[in-house]
Image (tube, helix red, strand yellow):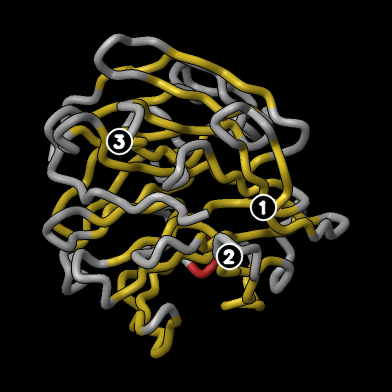
């Protein structure tokens, strides 16, 4: 389909990622991984803020009691409402950094990692709870990326980007089983990156080096393509008071001559209907 995108925030993020709607504050959270910045954007007032972190950041999500949880290079940290920072789980590994993360239906954080050199098996996907406990769910990952759950919470979708697949698991009692392919990205169409699941159970996935966002039906059929003016599309999420606008992050890292909007935050108004996502219970 031909969709009308707009520029929500014109920026030059090196590696824009992880758009997340914070319903409690009415603002969109997104990050620049390599720029070590947390951005906020209020779609009603247009107000923006930028916070610099001390190290590369892979994801930021709201917490149920206020504040933020951060997936950082050296582990998972908590930012309290008064801006006090503390580590929830610190485990630095040389050559490894944080990447995408998502909050599960039970309020736990599923946080991914990857090596800077993207070596196969160098990354992981782990589950963190509010008391600081950590469990490695997947330990043989190259580039841990998009993670999301079906509307009824029975399925979890997951991307390890170099596989060129979106996989699906059965999600039961806070764990996963039965991994199987859900959708495959053909050669030449880019690599799957961040994803979101809408209220109809469709999976929207951003395509790195694919200049597009795709929507797949719950049966895995491709039924919509949003073409964009930048090659490195990184993630997408529904946001706004009615969760009907699709926000899309982009990157300019590694491009010799980045197109003008590379690194900007884009939006497709009225693209669909998103799910109200849980906050981290910690």
Q: Residue at x 64, y 26 (%)?
A: 256
Q: CA distance from mark 2 to mark 3?
A: 22 Å
Q: Residues within 10 Å of mark 1 (few under 14, many from 20)?
A: many
Assess whether mark 2 and mark 1 are in contact (beta carbons under 8 angstroms): yes
User: Which mark identifies residue 76?
Assistant: 1
Horizontal side, residue 2 vs residue 203: left or right: left
> Which label belongs to residue 128?
2
* Residue, disc 3: 23
Q: Residues within 10 Å of mark 2 (few under 14, many from 20)?
A: many
Q: Is residue 200 left or right of residue 126?
A: left
> What is the crowding at mark 3: few (fewer than 14 residues within 10 Å), some, or many (at least 20)?
some
Q: Earlier in the sequence, mark 2 or mark 3?
A: 3
Q: Residue at x 14, y 34 (%)?
A: 242
Q: Residue furthest right?
A: 94
**Cα–Cα span, label 1 and label 3:** 22 Å
Give percent across and percent down for residue 40: 46, 23
Q: Front-most of 106 and 152?
A: 106
Q: Residue 40: in sight, yes or no?
A: yes
């Amino acid at each position: 389909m031909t969709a009308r995108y707009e520029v929500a925030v014109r920026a030059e993020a090196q590696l824009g990622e992880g758009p997340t709607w914070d319903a409690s504050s009415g603002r969109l959270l997104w990050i620049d991984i390599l720029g070590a910045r947390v951005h906020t954007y209020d779609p009603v007032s247009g107000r923006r803020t930028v916070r610099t972190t001390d190290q590369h950041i892979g994801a930021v999500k709201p917490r149920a009691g206020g504040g933020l949880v951060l997936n950082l290079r050296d582990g998972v940290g908590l930012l309290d409402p008064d801006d006090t920072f503390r580590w929830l789980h610190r485990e630095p590994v040389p050559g490894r950094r944080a990447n995408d993360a998502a909050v599960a239906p039970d309020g736990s954080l599923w946080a991914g990692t990857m090596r800077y050199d993207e070596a196969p098996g160098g990354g992981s996907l782990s589950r963190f709870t509010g008391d600081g406990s950590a469990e490695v769910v997947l330990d043989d990952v190259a580039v841990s990326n998009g993670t999301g759950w079906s509307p009824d919470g029975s399925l979890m979708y997951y991307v390890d980007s170099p596989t060129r697949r979106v996989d699906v698991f059965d999600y039961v009692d806070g764990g996963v089983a039965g991994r199987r392919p859900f959708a495959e990205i053909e050669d030449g169409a880019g690599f799957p990156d961040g994803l979101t699941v809408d209220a109809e159970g469709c999976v929207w996935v951003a395509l790195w080096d694919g200049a597009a966002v795709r929507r797949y039906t719950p049966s895995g059929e491709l039924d919509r393509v949003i073409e964009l003016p930048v090659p490195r599309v990184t993630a997408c999420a529904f946001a706004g008071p009615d969760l009907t606008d699709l926000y899309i992050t982009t990157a300019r890292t590694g491009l010799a001559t980045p197109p003008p909007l590379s690194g900007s935050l884009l939006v497709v108004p009225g693209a669909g209907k998103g799910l109200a996502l849980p906050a981290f219970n910690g």
